[in-house]
Image (cartoon, grey):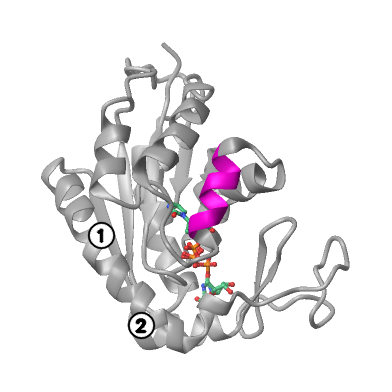
Amino acid sequence: MAKLFRAVIMGPPGSGKGTISERIAQRFGLTRLSSGDFIRENIAANTDAGVLAKTYIERGLLVPDHVMTRLLLPRLEEMTRHSWLMDGFPRTLAQAEALNSTCDLDLVISLNIPYETLKERLSDRWIHPASGRVYNMGFNPPHVQGRDDISGEPLIQHDDDKPEALVARLRHYKDVAKPIIDLYKSKGILHTFSGTETDRIWPYINSLLSTKIPMEGTHRTQRPCTRGY
Ligand SMILES: Nc1nc2c(ncn2[C@@H]2O[C@H](COP(=O)(O)OP(=O)(O)OP(=O)(O)O)[C@@H](O)[C@H]2O)c(=O)[nH]1
Ligand SMILES: Nc1ccn([C@H]2C[C@H](O)[C@@H](COP(=O)(O)OP(=O)(O)O)O2)c(=O)n1
């Protein structure tokens, strides 16, 4: 059995999940799976799940568990021979339990970032909608203000990145994330990182993963993700 490594990254809105996931994918060669990007692809492709998901997202609601599970677990089934890092799923205990019934996770990274930092980051976040590429006027600004570095297309800000929306999103995140964090803590696979700067947190995540991700040549058996939901 080829060596496999599967991980999840969790954190409140603006905590740096996408930023750190990209670094992990590049540094360790894992496939980055973003549930948000996957939902947007389905919405753009007008799939049944995408059309349904859109009706919730447009109202600022989380997509129901059964829709998310139906969307994502077949995607994971395609990844049985790949190591991956998932961002944005699971978001609820039901999603975590559905994931646990199909995959053995090796590690969960939980980002613990102060509210004021989240507020500041999200107010400076600009996004290229078509690609999901993320910029920050203070942290990683685009070469041309308001324009995506690759396509040159305009950048936008999400309405729910505004400070007045963040309080509710943060409260909701804390409510839904706590049982998931407790679950992974009980499994002994949770690793929490606190701080206000990604560049200061990154070395700790990098060194943790360097000890956890199997090197070439080491073999471990692992139950592949199978359709168990
Ligand atoms: N100033 C500053 N901005 C950062 C830092 N790390 C990430 N950012 C920016 O903060 C914003 C949020 O980072 P993301 O990686 O999008 O965070 P996320 O957890 O994926 O956010 P959601 O998708 O909303 O859950 C982006 O604009 C990042 O470029 C940092 O250390 N300092
Ligand atoms: N497990 C998930 C993942 C994403 N969603 C929703 C939440 C967002 O409105 C969209 C896009 O997710 P994305 O992770 O890109 O956005 P946020 O992290 O919530 O800012 O999908 C969900 O309802 N359930």
Mark 1 Cβ inside 8 Å of ligand 2: no
User: Mark 1 belongs to which amino acid?
Assistant: Val
Magenta stretch, main secondary structure, is: helix
Q: Secondary structure at mark 1?
A: helix
Residue count near mark 1 (Cα–Cα under 10 Å), binned few <14, some 14–19, many ≥20: some
Classify residue 176 by image quadrant. Answer: bottom left
The magenta region covers 49-56
Query: Residue beneath label 2, please?
Result: 167
Q: Position of residue 169 (x, y in %)?
A: 38, 73
For residue 140, side relative to residue 75 (left or right) = right
Mark 2 Cβ inside 8 Å of ligand 1: no
> Which residue: 41% across, 44% down?
210
For residue 6, side relative to residue 176 (left or right) = right
> Which residue: 27% across, 32% down?
100
The reply to whether residue 111 is in sight is yes
- Pick whichever, 30 or 102, lies toward us: 102
Mark 2 and mark 1: span between their CA atoms?
A: 14 Å
- Pick whichever, 119 or 200, lies toward us: 119
> Which residue: 53% across, 42% down?
33
Q: Of callouts 2 and 1, which one flags the residue occurring earlier in the amino acid sequence? A: 2
- Pick whichever, 141 or 59, lies toward us: 59
Q: Position of residue 168 (x, y in %)?
A: 35, 78
Q: Position of residue 2 (x, y in %)?
A: 45, 15
Query: Which residue of the protein is positioned furthest toward the left in this rendering?
Result: 186
Kindly identify which numbered label has been placed on residue 176. 1
For residue 42, side relative to residue 80 (left or right) = right
The reply to whether residue 26 is in sight is no
